[in-house]
Image (spheres, rainbow, N blue to C red):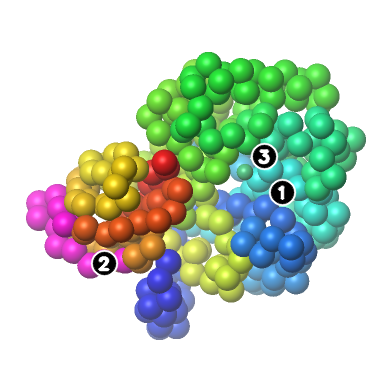
Amino acid sequence: MKRVNFFILKFILLLFPYLLLSDGHIFVYHRFDDSRYPTTNISTSTLKREFDYLKKHNYKVVPLVDIVKKIQNREKVPDNWVAFTIDDGFKSFYTNGLPVFKRYGYPFTLFIAVKYTEENYRDYVTWRQLKEISKYGSVEFHSYGHGHFGRMSSEKIRADMDKGLSLMKKHLNYKPKLFVYPYGEYDSRVKKIIESYGFQAVFNQNMGAVNGVCSNIYDIDRSAVVGSNAKDFKLYLYFKELCGVTFQKPLKYPKDKIVKTVEVTLNDKSIESADIFISNHGWHRVKVNNGKIVYHANKRVNRERIKIGVKVKNRIKLMVLSK
Ligand SMILES: [Zn+2]
């Protein structure tokens, strides 16, 4: 997100700190105290600062399944609820992150890419460590080989899923209830395959919040607060989920790498202006006419996966398009 937006948010928060209470939030981490990979790392000193902040401001860190239950029941997620997730199963979570979670007594959910544990990759947790980890939090599923599902055939995706699930059954005697898309990438075809596995809930990696009543149980937002974003942790807590959003254009990654027109429909017809986000370009203020946004962007993008988002004040919803 562009710095200028956060600057405005910081200013607002200074004036109206009570606005901080806004929907539930799920955060995702990857590596802990592993400076080799700055974009997916968080230092445990930063993590402790975040945990202290939550304690001081009466946030309640809940198991992820508690948020899932609220969505299943179409109930509002309490404004002070926060859940933590950790993706991939890097060893640095076991070595550096877990002791902090234990000290604060905070629950967490670890989503593992099974292959790296099964094949004893040095940087990943072992099955024995996973058994220990599962005493303090839950261990759920993040595919077998962490492939780009959007580029894999449906058969290959199913084979990957089946292999990972059977290994979790074999080593942990557990049938996962929750799933996270590798790289946070998905499209309608991938979504359909994953839904056929009957998970209770599926998570993406789009910055946002979880309202509960309007959240999609197969597409739940999680914010990655890592790298240079880590210092803005508090600001992520300020977001609410923007309900009633339908992204209409573009629905596929543009072949010529130019996002021409962004079209979004909002259920709330009273909204008069919004901000549209396009990766590489930040936010752009647009008019909303009777719930309809048509933004002739013509923006060149260069990432393998791009995000398009819409924000109305502090209510936000993003989606991802991958090559
Ligand atoms: Zn991952």
For badge 3, the amino acid type reads Phe
- In this rendering, position of residue 22 left or right of residue 249: right
- Nearest the camera: 127 or 22? 127
Residue 290 percent coordinates (x, y): 10, 51
- Nearest the camera: 182 or 213? 182
For badge 2, the amino acid type reads His
At x 29%, y 47%, the residue is 256
For residue 149, say whether it is visible: yes
Return the residue at label 1: 107
- Please identify, in this view, whether the residue under mark 3 or under mark 2 is nearer the observer: 2
Query: Is residue 11 within the magenta segment?
Result: no
Question: Which of disc 2 and disc 3 is earlier in sequence?
Answer: 3
Secondary structure, magenta segment, majority class: strand
Residue 41 percent coordinates (x, y): 68, 61
| Residue extending furthest toward the left | 289
At x 61%, y 18%, the residue is 159
Q: Dot 1: what SS? A: loop
Q: Crowdedness of circle 2 by 10 Å Cα count: few (<14), some, many (20+)?
A: some
Residue 161's disc is: none
Quadrant including the C terminus: top left
Structural distance between the alpha carbons of marks 2 and 1: 37 Å
The magenta segment is 283-296
Return the residue at label 3: 111
At x 51%, y 43%, the residue is 184
- Nearest the camera: 67 or 292? 292
Structural distance between the alpha carbons of marks 3 and 2: 34 Å
Whether label 3 lies within 8 Å of ligand 1 gets the answer yes
Q: Crowdedness of circle 1 by 10 Å Cα count: few (<14), some, many (20+)?
A: some
Residue 286 percent coordinates (x, y): 18, 63
Return the residue at label 2: 284
For badge 1, the amino acid type reads Pro
Judged from the image, the quadrant occupied by ligand 1 is top right
